[in-house]
Image (cartoon, rainbow, N blue to C red):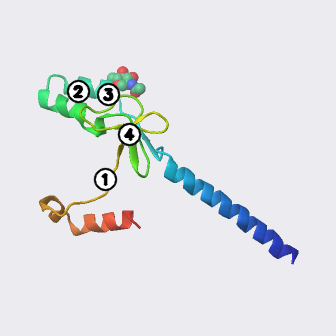
Amino acid sequence: MACSAISLSIGTISALVAVACLAIAFGTDNWYEIRVNRTSIRQKLDGNEEAMNEFEENIRYFDRDEGLFRICFPNNKPQNAKTFLSPVLTECININYYIPDNEISDAFSETRWERLRKYRI
Ligand SMILES: *[C@@H]1O[C@H](CO)[C@@H](O)[C@H](O)[C@H]1NC(C)=O
């Protein structure tokens, strides 16, 4: 009997910890922290107008923290990005997981579709 009481207690505590971890996972935006050395990239792009425009607008050239639902920019944010202020006061955008049915997605290889399906499990 004592053994089942102990295992029941451990199970209950583990369940509470799991729920707490899940809540933290859904609530935070720090699953990935990506830091970009913009100084170094700017030096390499020197003078190329088109590349400089992309450098200022594409999110891949900015420091960012990625969560399940949002990408947040702790320092600079991309030009023209429609950001909103997160509860911790960083500029964020929502991640759009929807893949439209168009000529771009038609060109996805079978391997790429398989990879996307496995990401979503
Ligand atoms: C960024 O790149 C510049 C130029 O390459 C370098 O001097 C600097 O140390 C780098 N900064 C970081 C934080 O790595």
Q: Give the foreground label among 1 and 2.
A: 1
Q: Which residue is mark 4?
A: 92
State the image coordinates of residue 4 (x, y, percent, origin top left).
81, 75
Give the quarter the ligand 1 occupies.
top left
Q: CA distance from mark 2 to mark 4?
A: 27 Å
Q: CA distance from mark 1 to mark 4?
A: 13 Å
Question: Can you identify the residue that label 2 sits on?
Answer: 44
Q: Which mark is residue 96?
A: 1
Quadrant of image for the C terminus: bottom left
Q: Is mark 2 within 8 Å of ligand 1?
A: no
Q: Earlier in the sequence, mark 2 or mark 4?
A: 2
Q: Is residue 37 left or right of residue 45?
A: right
- Residue drawn at (23%, 27%) of the image: 44
Residue type at numbered disc 2 = Lys
- Label 1 sits on a secondary structure element that is loop
Q: Nearer the viewer, mark 2 or mark 4?
A: 4
Circle nearer the N terminus (3, 1): 3
Tell which circle, 3 or 4, labels the residue nearer the N-terminal end: 3
Q: Residues within 10 Å of mark 1 (few under 14, many from 20)?
A: few
Q: Amino acid at mark 3?
A: Arg
Name the residue beneath numbered marker 3: 38
Name which of mark 1 and mark 2 comes first in the sequence.
2
What's the distance in space between the residues labelled 3 and 4, CA to CA? Answer: 19 Å
Q: Nearer the viewer, residue 85 or 24?
A: 85
**Crowd around label 2: few <14 · some 14–19 · many ≥20 (10 Å):** few
The quarter of the picture where residue 19 lies is: bottom right
**For the residues marked 1 and 2, what is the alpha-carbon distance in whole angstroms?**
31 Å
Q: Residue at x 18, y 62 (%)?
A: 105
* Image quarter (top left, top right, bottom left or bottom right) of the N terminus: bottom right
What is the three-letter code of the residue carrying label 4?
A: Cys
Residue 119, image x and y in percent?
38, 62
